Amino acid sequence: MEFKNAPGSSDSGQFLPYVLYVGGEKQVSALDITDASSKMWFHEPLKDGDSGIPAPFLYDIAGKKVVIASIFHGKQGQHPMVAGLDMSVESMQEMAEKWKPFGPESRLSVVSYDGTVVARAGDPDKRGQPVESVDSAWAREARQALDSKEASVTWQEDSLNIWTPIRLGSRGNFWFISLYIPRDVAFASVYALTKG
C-alpha cells in the first residue's frame, strides 16, 4: 500500500488524518476507527451520509481537561467519506456564567441528548458528567425532557425550570437548555400587584 503508515494514514493505508493544534503546533495522527465509539461518528455517517453531533466528552489537551463536541458529516457517492470537526465547548460554560436574564440567582445549563452536562452556571466541575451527578430532582427533570424532546416547565417548591430543546444534525437528536429561576423572582411582578 502506497500510503501505509504515512502521516495521517493507518497501517492498512486508509487515509484517516486527525489534525490537532496545540500551542500553535500541528500534530497529525491516524484515527482509530475500530473502537465502539467510532460507530456513531464514522461508520454510520459513512453508510447513511447524514450529519450530527455526538455526545460531548472530556479530552486531555496539553494537560488540561477540555469538554469537546464533535460535528460530523457523511458524504455518499463514488468516493464516500466522512469529515468531522472537534471543538471545545468552553464558550458554552462562559455563556452560562454570564447569561442571567432573571438576575444573579437564575442559572443556565446545557445538556446533550444522552444526558451529559455540557455547561452549568456556578458548577463547572459537572461538565462532561451525567445529569445524575448534579442532584436527583434536576436529573429526573432532565431525563423527562430528553425523553419527551419537547419544551416544558417544571416546578419545585421554591423554583421553576424552563426546558427548551435544540435539534442538532439530521439524526433527530436534541440537546436541551435548562433555565432555573427562583419562584420569588419569577412571580415578583405578580407579588407586587397583589401588594399594591
Image (cartoon, rainbow, N blue to C red):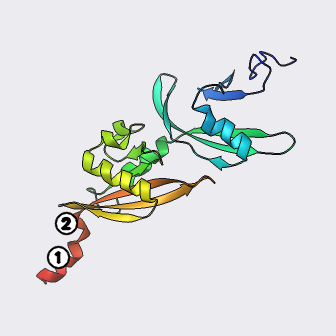
Decide: few, some or many residues near mark 1? Use Cα within 10 Å; few <14, some 14-19, many ≥20: few
Q: Which residue is drawn at 43% across and 42% down?
A: 116
Determine the image quadrant of residue 23: top right
Q: In the picture provided, is 71 more to the left or to the right than 13? A: left
Q: Residue at x 35, y 36 (%)?
A: 125
Q: Name the residue under label 2.
A: 184
Q: Picture coordinates of residue 155 (x, y %)?
A: 25, 63
Which quadrant would the N terminus be assigned to in this image? top right
Q: In the picture provided, is 77 more to the left or to the right than 54? A: right
Which sits in the foreground, 25 or 58?
A: 58
Q: Mark 1 points at which residue?
A: 191
Q: Picture coordinates of residue 160 (x, y %)?
A: 27, 62
Q: Is mark 2 on a helix, strand or loop?
A: helix
The answer to whether 30 is drawn above or below residue 73 in the figure is above
Q: Which amino acid lies under the numbered mark 1 shown in the image of this protein?
A: Tyr
Q: Give the mark nearer the N terminus: 1 vs 2.
A: 2
Q: Which amino acid lies under the numbered mark 2 shown in the image of this protein?
A: Asp
Q: Picture coordinates of residue 169 (x, y %)?
A: 61, 52
